[in-house]
Image (tube, rainbow, N blue to C red):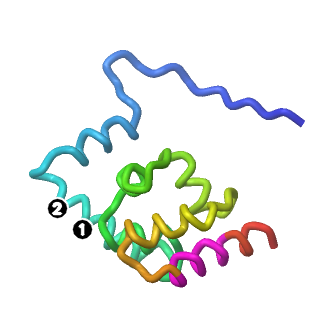
Amino acid sequence: MEVSVVHPPQRPGWRAMSERIAELDQDPRRAKAWAEARRKMAEELYPSHSLAALRLKKGLSQTELARRIGASQSWLSRIEAGTDIPSHPTVVKLAKALEEELQAVSDAIMEKIGAHHD
């Protein structure tokens, strides 16, 4: 079964939310506030041991963490969702970029994969 997604046309003068967020992430005046907002989101919305929570606690966007490990944001999103399994070297890069123990990052990924496939 093939599924296609149809996106509505973008209104003139409007930008995608991802573009606006990327722009705001680059603004040094707002960077600290964005990092704090991500930390608060981690506390409120994600299990404390998830990869997303580990990332958000560091105040990082998916885009920034992906940049730090040399990957795409969309691939990192799939890893966080448990729909893609990273290689061991990628898990090592994630642990270094997040300044977390390798075991904590590995456990977070494996738990999500297990939950996704149950």
Residue situated in front as seen by the camera: 35 or 98: 98
State the CA–CA distance, disc 1 to disc 2.
Answer: 6 Å
Above or below 40: residue 18:
above
Callout 1 touching callout 2 (CB < 8 Å) = yes
Residue situated in front as seen by the camera: 63 or 45: 63
Q: Is residue 54 magenta?
A: no
The residue depicted at 30 percent of the width and 66 percent of the height is 59
In what element is the residue under mark 2? helix
- Span highlighted in magenta in the image: 103-112
Name the image quarter holding residue 85: bottom right
Quarter of the image containing the N terminus? top right
**Residue 32, numbered label:** 2
Outermost residue toward the left in this view: 29
Above or below 59: residue 111:
below
Quarter of the image containing the C terminus? bottom right
Q: Position of residue 70 (x, y in %)?
A: 44, 49
Report crowding for label 1: few under 14, some 14 to 19, many 20 or more residues within 10 A (C-alpha): some
The residue depicted at 68 percent of the width and 31 percent of the height is 5
Say what amino acid the circle numbered 1 marks: Glu
The residue singled out by tag 1 in the image is 36
* SS assignment for the magenta stretch, majority: helix
Outermost residue toward the right in this view: 1
Say what amino acid the circle numbered 2 marks: Lys
Q: Position of residue 74 (x, y in %)?
A: 54, 46
The residue depicted at 41 percent of the width and 19 percent of the height is 11
Report crowding for label 2: few under 14, some 14 to 19, many 20 or more residues within 10 A (C-alpha): few
In what element is the residue under mark 1? helix
The residue depicted at 36 percent of the width and 28 percent of the height is 15
Q: Position of residue 89 (x, y in %)?
A: 56, 64
